[in-house]
Image (cartoon, rainbow, N blue to C red):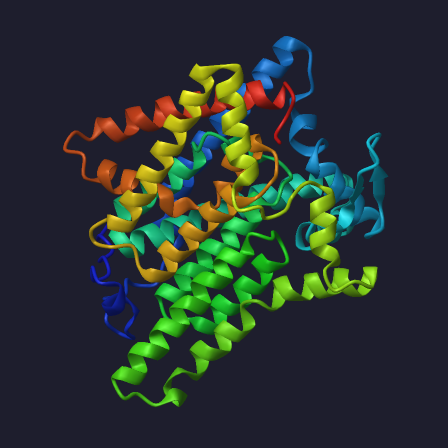
Amino acid sequence: MSETKAVPPSWAAALRPGSASRPSALSLRDAAPALLGYVAVRVTGVAILLITAAATGKDGMHRLSGRWDSVWYQRIAEHGYGYEVRLPDGTLHSDLAFFPLLPALERGVSAFLPPLGVAGAGLLVSWLASLAAAAGIYAVGARLYGHRAGVLLAVLWGVYPTAFVQSMAYTETLFTALAAWALYAVLTDRWITAGVLCMGAGLTRPVAAALIAAICVTALWRLVTARRAGEPLRAHRRMLAGACLAPLGWLSYIVFVAVRERSPFAYFDVQAAWNNRIDGGAALAAFVAQQFRHDVLAGLGLCAAFAFLFWVVWRCVRQRPRQPLPVIVYCLVVVVISLIGSGYFGSRPRLMMPAFPLLLPAAVALAGARRGAIPAVIVAVAALASGVYGAFTLLGSGPP
């Protein structure tokens, strides 16, 4: 199988129409190794969960399909919006905090396949979306750094520490699938497709703001470089159309909540009631400081984890050949959004999971390993560790 040619190292060059040597159209045969590898590591994780659950007398499948946020999505699928819970401290939790695409798909699939029920439909949608996400991640990786790097990128995403969420009836896989293919569409100059996919992502998770930023910043940069080159604006009509389409999904849901609640900032008020607001990282800093007061080693461990994260981000920014502008903007904004919110600290790794370009430096390094067994051993160890952590989390307090 021939290697996919990488794009030029310069962001500007990579964004010029026709500057990159496009690979032949992706086929199932191209993506098969990535999909098989991804399925293998996720089956390993689910198997560890089910075996551990059986040994402890718990229902592993129920942990995947019928608890935590999954219940909120299923209730929306069955009854629509309008459910609220008043907590003992007076806080009001509304289902308007959850975006509509996943419950809409759950409702449609359960109507088409009644034996599944809404819970089973949610799992089916999530599992199929995980395959689409793995294929899209492979497509981006192969486009940038070759077939082998693309395969490893998809498999590494499947062994991410919180990858157990990829096997749950959650929105992470659906959003990542839409985001990965939207980025691939931008990289291959298919702007209308990118805009439509971004609309879908905007109906799935609020972090779609990162994908919107990636598309719009890239379009703006292309316009600036085109103007300097004396190119007419009409030559970029499809790009402008795609950039205009990109935010419509996200904005439409914000407007829907505003109209429903008769307040222009209703969606943000709903999120604030769930303790999800942008505070510039104040809550995160307070949490780290609290750890130092209670256990210095825990505080140092957190600082080491953040240092590692920032080092990985730096490696992404400095990677050679460079990650193209839309990919790096998407990745950076997902990370920033995950860090500057006031939500529960334990949810941050899960919120960062759609930022799959963070894994590109590792995928490229493993792809270039001289000993062919090294990537397989590393992936196997990571799959086991991820599976054990997933079982421990799901059979305990559950995903934040």
Residue placed most toward the observer, 297 or 38: 297
Residue placed most toward the observer, 31 or 146: 146
Q: Is residue 283 above or below residue 195?
A: above
Q: Residue at x 40, y 66 (%)?
A: 186
**Residue 282 location, x and y as percent?**
54, 40
Q: Residue at x 67, y 50 (%)?
A: 102
Q: Is residue 103 visible?
A: no
Q: Residue at x 37, y 26 (%)?
A: 304
In the visual, does 153 lie left or right of 55?
left
**Residue 87 location, x and y as percent?**
82, 33
Q: Is residue 115 above or below residue 48?
A: below
In the visual, does 3 lie left or right of 102?
left
Q: Residue farthest to the left?
A: 370
Q: Residue at x 45, y 54 (%)?
A: 180
Q: Is residue 378 above or below residue 100?
A: above
In the visual, does 194 lie left or right of 357?
right
Q: Is residue 101 visible?
A: yes
**Residue 69 location, x and y as percent?**
69, 38
Residue placed most toward the observer, 113 or 353: 353
Residue placed most toward the observer, 16 or 372: 16
**Residue 377 location, x and y as percent?**
29, 24
- Which quadrant is the C terminus positioned in? top right
Q: How many marks?
A: 0
